[in-house]
Structure formats: structure tokens, C-alpha cells
Image (spheres, grey):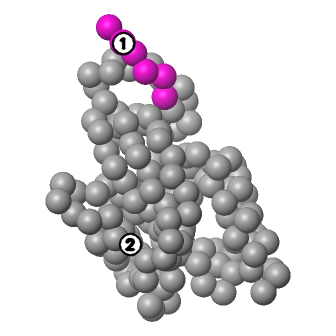
């Protein structure tokens, strides 16, 4: 039986049978305004993550991103260019679900700036955070890649 090594939501390496995995395309927004980015806290591990989530069957990527960001932050956004893609194998322990995920990240601009309460079961406390204040160890998953992405945006904003 084929097994796949992956990380769980607590950052631990686990090995699971391939049959346990669900294919899950997902979309996330890097919502930036005035050198700040919108991040959420994951309830299961207390670390930061970007607003977004699974794309439903028949749903367009841009529509899924707008829906997810509205649900998790209360923000209406304008979707910009895709800035990052990553394939990821992930085990979400609280639901005993494993995902073979395609993660699409888009730069987004907010149409409004007042953050509301998250209605998502895993996310809490959406907030604007200065990009330069985000530390790599505070990011939930794919920390190294996403930290580098934030640093790149911080550098671009400093030169403007």
C-alpha cells in the first residue's frame, strides 16, 4: 500500500495511506494595503494563515477567492495576478482529513478596509498586520515560501 509523508496542522510529519487523501484545489488572497497584510489565526495551532480555502466544484477561482475572503474577513476585494502556486500534501488532524492540495495565491486589493468577524470554523481573529512585523515561525504552513513572498512585497513597498 502506497503511503505519503506530509505535515499535519501542528507541523508534525505523518505518514498516511494514499487512499486517505482528497484532491482539493484551494485559493488564497494576499490582501495588501498600506504596507499591511490581512492574516488570520488558525484555531488549531494559533499560527497565521492567509484568507482563502477550497474551490467548490463548478466555481471559478476568482469567485471562490472573493467568497472565502468575505466569509473569513468581511472584506470585499479586487483580485489581482496569481503570485504563487504550490502543491501540498497536508493532514488536518481535527477532522481526520488528508488533502492533496493545489494552492493558488493571488495578490488582492481591498475595496473596504474594515475587517469583520470570521465565520470560518478553523480561522479566527482576522487582522491587518504590518508586513515587516510577520515572522517566519508565525506562519502556519509553507512558512519558508510564504515568508519569502511577504519579504518580497515588503521590499517592493519600501521602494515606492
Q: Quadrant of residue 15?
A: top left
CA separation, marks 2 and 1?
A: 36 Å
* Residue at disc 1, secondary structure: loop
Q: Which mark is residue 69?
A: 2
Horizontal placement of 31 versus 51: left or right? right
Q: Are marks 2 and 1 in contact (CB under 8 Å)?
A: no
Dominant secondary structure, magenta: strand
Asked whether residue 18 is in view, the answer is yes
Q: Quadrant of residue 60?
A: bottom left
- 102 to 108, vertically: above or below: above
Residue 127 x/y as whole percent? 54, 75
The C terminus sits in image quarter:
bottom right
Horizontal placement of 75 versus 131: left or right? left
Residue 56 painted magenta: no
Q: Residue at x 65, y 49 (%)?
A: 145
Horizontal placement of 88 versus 120: left or right? right
Seen from the viewer's position, the closer of residues 141 and 27 is: 27
* Residue at disc 2, secondary structure: helix
User: Which segment did they paint magenta?
Assistant: 1-6
**Label 2 Cα crowd, 10 Å radius (few <14 / some 14-19 / many 20+):** many
Seen from the viewer's position, the closer of residues 128 and 55 is: 55
Residue 107 x/y as whole percent? 53, 72
**Residue with the mark numbered 1:** 2
**Label 1 Cα crowd, 10 Å radius (few <14 / some 14-19 / many 20+):** few
The N terminus sits in image quarter:
top left
Q: Nearer the viewer, mark 2 or mark 1?
A: 1
Q: Residue at x 44, y 62 (%)?
A: 28
Amino acid at each position: 500500500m502506497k503511503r505519503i509523508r506530509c505535515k499535519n496542522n501542528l507541523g508534525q510529519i505523518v505518514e498516511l495511506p494514499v487512499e486517505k487523501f482528497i484532491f482539493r484545489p484551494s485559493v488564497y488572497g494576499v490582501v495588501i494595503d498600506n504596507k499591511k497584510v490581512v492574516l488570520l489565526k488558525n484555531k488549531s495551532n494559533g499560527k497565521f494563515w492567509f484568507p482563502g480555502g477550497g474551490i467548490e466544484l463548478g466555481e471559478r477561482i476568482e469567485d471562490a477567492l472573493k467568497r472565502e475572503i468575505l466569509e473569513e474577513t468581511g472584506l470585499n476585494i479586487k483580485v489581482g495576478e496569481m503570485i504563487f502556486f504550490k502543491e501540498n500534501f497536508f493532514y488536518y488532524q481535527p477532522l481526520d482529513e488528508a488533502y492533496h492540495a493545489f494552492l493558488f495565491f493571488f495578490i488582492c486589493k481591498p475595496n473596504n478596509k474594515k475587517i469583520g468577524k470570521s465565520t470560518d470554523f478553523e480561522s479566527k481573529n482576522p487582522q491587518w498586520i504590518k508586513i515587516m512585523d510577520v515572522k517566519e515561525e508565525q506562519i502556519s504552513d509553507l512558512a519558508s515560501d510564504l515568508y519569502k513572498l511577504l519579504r518580497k512585497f515588503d521590499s517592493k513597498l519600501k521602494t515606492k
